[in-house]
Image: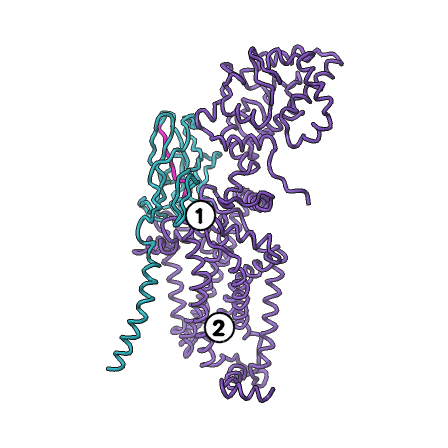
Chain colours: A purple, B cyan
Amino acid sequence: MKALWEWLDSRTGIRHLAQEALMEKIPGGARWRYVWGSALTFCLAIQFITGVVLWAAYSPGAKSAWESVFYIQHEMAGGWFLRGLHHYTAQLMVVLLALHLMQVLIDGAYKAPREVNFWFGLALLMVTLGLALTGYLLPWDQKGYWATKVATNIAAITPVFGSQIERLIVGGSDYGNLTLTRFFALHAGILPGAIVVLVAGHIALFRRHGITAKKPFRKPDANFWPDQVLMDAVAALAVVLTAVSLTVYFRGAELSAPADPSEPYSAARPEWYFLFLFQFLKYFPGGTEVWGAIIIPSGVLGVMALMPLLGQWKLGHRFNLGFVGAILVGALFLTFEAKLQDSRDPECRKAVEKAHRDSERAVELAKSPTGIPEGGAALLLRRDPLTQGPRLFAQHCAGCHRFDGHDGLGNTLQEAASAPDLKGFGSREWLSGLLDPDRVATAHYFGGTKFKDGKMVRFVQQKVAKYSEAKRADLAKVILAVSAEAALPLQAELDVRDRALIEEGRTLARESVNCTDCHQFRKPDEDATAPDLTGWGSREWLVAIIGNPAHTRFYGKRNDRMPAFAETGQLDVEKIGTLADWLRGDWYRAAAR
Amino acid sequence: MKEAAAVAIGGAATLVPVASGLLVWLDPLNSGGGEGQSSFSRITGLESLPADGVPRKFTVIADRQDAWTKNPKVPVGAIYLSRSAKGDITAFQSICPHAGCFVEYRPAKNEFFCPCHNSSFAADGTIKDPKSPSPRPMDTLAVEIRGNEVWVRFQNFQAGHREKIPTA
Ligand code: FES
């Protein structure tokens, strides 16, 4: 063993190297206040290790980034943990950088002859923030997409070359594939490369000038190994435990819904450590943005770069401390203010809730047996009745109809409904209400329409109201039969259970309740004057009536105000189908866990 | 002499990879890149636009060349359309001229509001609160009525400037 060691040393000089690296003298002994730099280096190691493995499963592309991150997060064993570790270590790095900077300033470790090393440190700070910024976009989720847009748009207002800079960052005029490949090249190649070079320089310069020992010394001098290394190791453990706790507590890093340029994301906020810059912009009215976004932040950086020179004077040192202190307090205040404003804004809370709903739904759909379609995960929500149905309803139907009293999205409207409430349309309950003499002419059914004095209402109010016990029992079976036409997924079990009654009801519709006097029902009927009850409430029926309610199969010439959505091109067939599915409660539900 | 030669030759050798890399890196500066979305897109039928001056949101569907992928008929953005009592139709880009967030229409106050830095715009797109960070009113888009249909020329504009400069 010893011989091997000797041989290796003679060929490489490793003993000297190890000696050099480990036996650095620390005047006054090891101290906890010296651990920040090592803790940061350790964070970098975590980021390199976790990052490379994430890289091995990540695919930068407008139709593969979210998809691959979803796969890491939800399908790969331990993927959520790995990604969480990467995510929270990045956040810790920002905190540690602030602490390291404070320690260097307070201890005066930035003064001559260590000016250049301070500049290296500043550069490292910038590169780390650049890594944070570029990493935020890579999942290509709504959060990263919209928040990063703000950042690149701000780059564009840089005087003179702004728009060129933006084009180079974005990889063109609009976000897309090239934005991801370029951000990824920055995040995983260029910036980490820069960090390695800068850290090497930073440490080399640090070694050259030695540690800035804090006086008074309370202990005798010691070597880096093992005293300081032990403390550094404890700090490393603390770092990793914190990152692990955060990961476990938050169950990994968030992945919001897939990016969609046509889908608003009002909860767009940058990561918390950029929030102060975000908030700062609010104070610059139109046209003065460049001050808040570029000039003042660059000015602050410029002053910080000058600090080592100023620090030569006692007064300068005080100024530096005061300056950085003021910036930190200001940043804290702005962050707090941003959080406060958001928490007070009910619209913002709603937006955050919507974002969570969408993100959970996207994941649920991606995990469903149909999985992520070839066209990308953005299609998951775009085609999802549960997500799009309410939006379509609010935009196209809620002018007249209601859904459970609201507009589909949960907003109550000022104007009274002028067409039926469609919650549960097709169900037994809905139909029972329609055939209830007390309810048929309310706003919930025909009360707001021109049919409120029509034949159906008269039939219910005059005939049904006087039904005998036996007739009412017949009607109940007819309701089962007509409702069964809808074949609602949520009623499927009941429909099977009540097969016999439904069969009876079909005959009674003709022979006892006389629906077929006006309606066509399960047999062609040329003379029918009221909407077809064959397939009433089924997907096909709904798509057809939304497409053209004035078709002879439905209201014909007697149609009230309802537009022919397909005929006039207001909605395409796919959207009408989505709406029909939503009204019918027909969407993918994950099996109860 | 030898020193100069060493520097020159070494420099020249290094120049080849650096210059060729730079050239490709700078490629996005070549304007357009096939991403120009300046043709008109069909948005909706006139029927879905009551003449009440209320802005309504519509998704813009268009073909999009995203670097190497051609995406036919995909959502490329969203706009607000409003039709005045007189029948004039205005189209607004939904993207905030300040820094690119998605502007909401808030019916309760009949205003556009940007949830990022709180720019507010009246329903006609003009800046409402003078303290709004947005440097200009909401961006309008060219509208054409073809028969019974509303067509809009969808464009993106550079954020943060007083002037409305199309990107791409
Ligand atoms: S992006 Fe709209 S106010 Fe800043």
* Quadrant in which the C terminus of chain A appears: top right
Q: Circle 2 — which element?
A: helix
Magenta run includes residue B89: yes
Q: Are marks 1 and 2 in contact (CB under 8 Å)?
A: no
Q: Is residue A141 left or right of residue A519?
A: left
Label drawn at residue B117: 1
Residue type beneath disc 2 = Val
Rounded to the nearest whole Å, what is the CA distance between mark 1 and mark 2?
Answer: 35 Å
In the shown orientation, is residue A18 left or right of residue B52?
A: right
Spot occupied by residue A59 in the image (x, y as percentages of width and height): 49, 55
Instruction: Quarter of the image for the N terminus of chain A: give it.
Output: bottom right
Q: Residue at x 44, y 63 (%)?
A: A189
- Residue type marked 1: His
Q: Can the viewer see residue A265? A: no
Q: Is residue A204 left or right of residue A591?
A: left
Which residue is tagged 2?
Answer: A104
The reply, left or right, for residue A171 in relation to residue A240 is: left
Residue B83 magenta-highlighted: no
Instruction: Mark yes or no: residue A288 visible.
Output: yes
Quarter holding residue B16: bottom left
Give the secondary structure at mark 1.
loop
Residue A448 vs A326, above or below: the answer is above
- Is the magenta region chiefly helix, strand or loop? strand
Magenta region, residue range: B88-95
Q: Can you tell which quarter of the image residue B157 is in?
A: top left
